[in-house]
Amino acid sequence: MTRAVIIGAGIVGSACAEALTRRGVEVVVVDRSAVGSGTTSRGEGNILVSDKGPGTELSLAELSRRAWLEVGELIGPSLIELEEKGGLVVAQSRAGLEALARFATGQRAAGVTALDVGDPQVLEPRLAAGLPGAVHYPEDMQVQPVLAAAALLAAALERGATFRTGTDVTAAVRDGDGSLSGIRTADGQVIEADVVVNASGTWGGEVSERLGAPVPVLPRRGFVLVTEPLPPLVRHKVYSADYVDNVGSSDAGLETSCVVEGTRGGTVLIGASRERVGFDTTLSVPVVETLARQAVALFPFLARVNLLRVYRGFRPYCPDHLPVIGPDPRVPGVIHACGHEGAGIGLAAGTGRLVGDYVTGARTHESAGEWAELLPDRFAGPSEQQV
Amino acid sequence: MSTTDVLVVGAGPAGLACAATILEHSSLSVVVVDAGHGPGGQYWRQPAPAVGADALDPAELADLHHDRARFDALLHRLEQGRTDGRLQLRSQHHVWSAVPDMQGYAVHAVDRGRGPSHVPGSTTVARALVLATGAFDRALPFPGWDLPGVMTVGGLQALLKAGGVVAGRRVALGGTGPFLLPVAAGLARHGATVVGVYEANRPARWLREGRAVARNAGKLGEGAGYAAALLRHRVPVRAGRMVVAAHGADRVEAITLARLDRAGHPVPGSDQRVAVDAVGVGWGFSPQLDLAVTLGVDLTPDVAGTEVVAVDDAQRTSRPGVYAAGEVCGVGGAPLALTEGRLAAAAVVADLTDGRVPADVVSSARRVVTRQRAFATAILRAHPVPAGWADRLAPDTIVCRCEEVTLGAVRAAIDERGARDARQVKQLTRTGMGWCQGRVCGYAAALLSSGRPGPAVERLVAAPVPLGTLGALAEPTARPSRRTGISDDAM
Amino acid sequence: MSTFEFDGAGIEFRPGQTIGAALVAAGQVSWRTTRVGGVRRGLFCGIGICFDCLVTVEGEPNQRACLVVAEPGLTVTTQEGTGHEHD
């Protein structure tokens, strides 16, 4: 039986554990902390197709959406607060609406359901009046990330997987031929394994170095605002379409693009900002103020609603903004599954499927096919590939 | 935005003493920001300023403040500072964030004193920041603790000091700590029948702390004064007893007491039911650390394992320009807070000016702080939360009052899903996600899941702020984000 | 005597008191219902920490009765659940 160690019990590691045990792989999940306690616990729980243009990421999002629905069937959608609530992308100017329409046309060609909405207030009565138009994406979904990670891990444990919390991985253990035979932990133990899955999210870069197969995963700070509990007044995931006609900016500065959505708990979540500032934990008041202003512009009733909490997280991103998923030829046995940036929850279930294919040999580095763009090779210089 | 040399958060004994000392020994400008209706904090809590023939007169409640003269002297000093244009006191301002700024520290507050529908925000930038944010009552759940009429001991005291109101005709007090006594005495003097003060610990514990107690004879005298008052009003003080349940339909009508064994567990069969119409329960105090934690200053555990702000012998925190005084450095009572406030002022004056607070003032303050910290530590040791505090909880006992999460749900998160600290309990059950952000239930959630008070919780927003208030402050500087900007599930 | 209105009835108070203190003095111990269990709540911590004493003042929900100062003529109403109207 194949033995796999999964490093990281976040949403991606937990989804991998569920997918691997489903295929009969013997799994040990290790994490420094508890299930879903890193970036997973700092997110809104988006499972989106609406924000992705045609390409590999959209393909993965569509695979992942189907996989999430199956996970929901397995676990029970209400236990993980899985809701097919749909997304509504709202234009706030004529130019914005034109750009949004062009973007949606491209998505439709790639199979996304994107419905033009003339009067956004029909779908979201509390939206500001007079907005020029919107696009409705009924396929967008939401999940409660920590509950989902915990449930996925629990499903794996039921099938015989083990979870070792409080465990820090220091190195890969390799055979004479250089292939992997296990991992070493900070307390000096060796856990034997045929494959190691690097699902360590924002810390994926550091873990990949310890495994001898470095991939560049960097932190990108974000804040999410959480309001007081409210009745269900926001029905969809509602975003501003501003992002569509502002493509191309990728410098270190602050970017905000307002996302407003309700939760089962009654709170409204307002995201999200992006800054490349390393692991700086300081609260950025201008970011909070800007997100609040944008949210109130979309939903005027929010002006009198209190902000109760802000949470801050560090998204794991790769320089080309695509996740790194697949076997690393430099250390046979190492499979990466990290760097999902702001889409980790949504892409987790599909990532689990891909990792399952690679672990069982149903798919190999050579037969990656449409997923070749996600392989770690894309970062390696020629000399590193010889290692 | 406004600027000042020194910003003091909190107008209780520590903050007031700090501001007054800075005004006296320097020419620095000082802003004091406080959530209360006027200066005083919880200790010198007063009715809101009011006029009119039927207005509540602080003199009616003067008996509740045995060191009123000291308070008046501080107010006098502040009034002089205000006249000189060097002091601003901003009451009813709730600080929601304090962050580093190029000029020092930026403190963001909302003004809750302009009526419910007008909540303006303000930002003050200061070269030095003094955290004198105090503490709040530590509560622990028990069956019925969410019935109207069940309050914290401090809540009963606040109602009396600020409102002149006794919460009920028949009042019981429970929990632990010397604070129970003055509250009982005050309630009795103002017309309540205090049916009993139920102190979970036993006075014998004090004897073990003999040295620290002996060196604080003044404090003992104070305690003796309350004891005499309680005797006069025939208030029974019963040690080794705990309120294990409150009963009633729409409000509390009775409580059940149990006797605790030596190990701190309720003794089976010792239950006794007492009719009441108000109850106050308090298990000591939790320091108000929200600003300190987000500023990233070093913390240190007190003898009971509760994290407090770590300061040097001049009340400097680990962060240059940030000072702390009073209960945030460890709960120790008003005299200690006052002295620490003066010490913090001396450090601010030394760090920001060429002047000095006289050396003898500083050295005598340091001696007082050393002595009183030892006393505070002795009190903490003598008044632990009993080991059996949770023995009598039921599966349907509410743990998180805001989100209405039961003990059963919390236990399931711990036993079935492996939650090992309050944060994990929160993620799995919503315990601590409501209006109070875990300030009430967080201590219990930590004890239940980890057996310890746990690390201080990070709350990036220290007080609720209307989104409209925030939005009005925003400059549209940030750029809309690109391609993946809207997908922020895993940030 | 100064009064404000609570659920249509006059509540006498002494200027300087909070709404919470005035209600307790008038014999009221609860003025909101919770959004999950629908049970009644009133003052608990009394100093603005616990948010259990939330009440609607002048139509504005979620005001802490222990902090808002009573004023003549104010309209105060029991708060049900979140205090916000459903769609």
Image: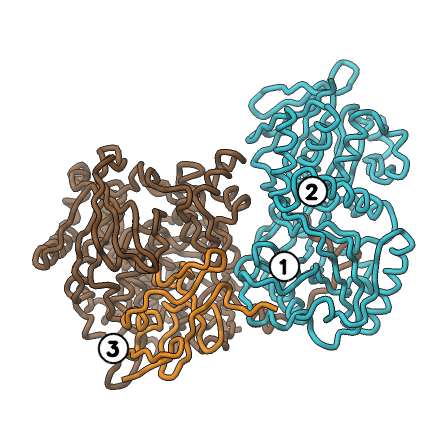
Q: Can you tell which chain is drawn cyan?
A: A
Mark 1 is surrounded, within 10 Å at the Cα level, by few (under 14), some (14 to 19) or many (20 or more) other residues, namely many
Q: Which chain is orange?
A: C
For badge 2, the amino acid type reads: Gly
Q: Position of residue A290 (x, y in %)?
A: 64, 66
Residue A262 tag number = 1
Nearer the observer, B416 or B334:
B416
The residue wearing badge 2 is A72
Tag 2 subunit: A
| C-alpha gap between disc 1 and disc 2 | 20 Å
Q: Residue at x 39, y 46 (%)?
A: B397
- Tell me which residue sits at (74%, 35%) in the image: A352
Image quadrant in which you'd find residue A121: bottom right
State how far apart marks 1 and 3 are (Cα).
Answer: 44 Å
Q: Nearer the viewer, residue B420 or C9?
A: C9
Q: Are marks 2 and 3 on the same chain?
A: no
Report the Cα–Cα distance between label 2 and label 3.
60 Å
**Label 1 in the same subunit as label 3:** no
Q: Quadrant of the N terminus of chain A?
A: top right
Mark sitting on residue B56: 3
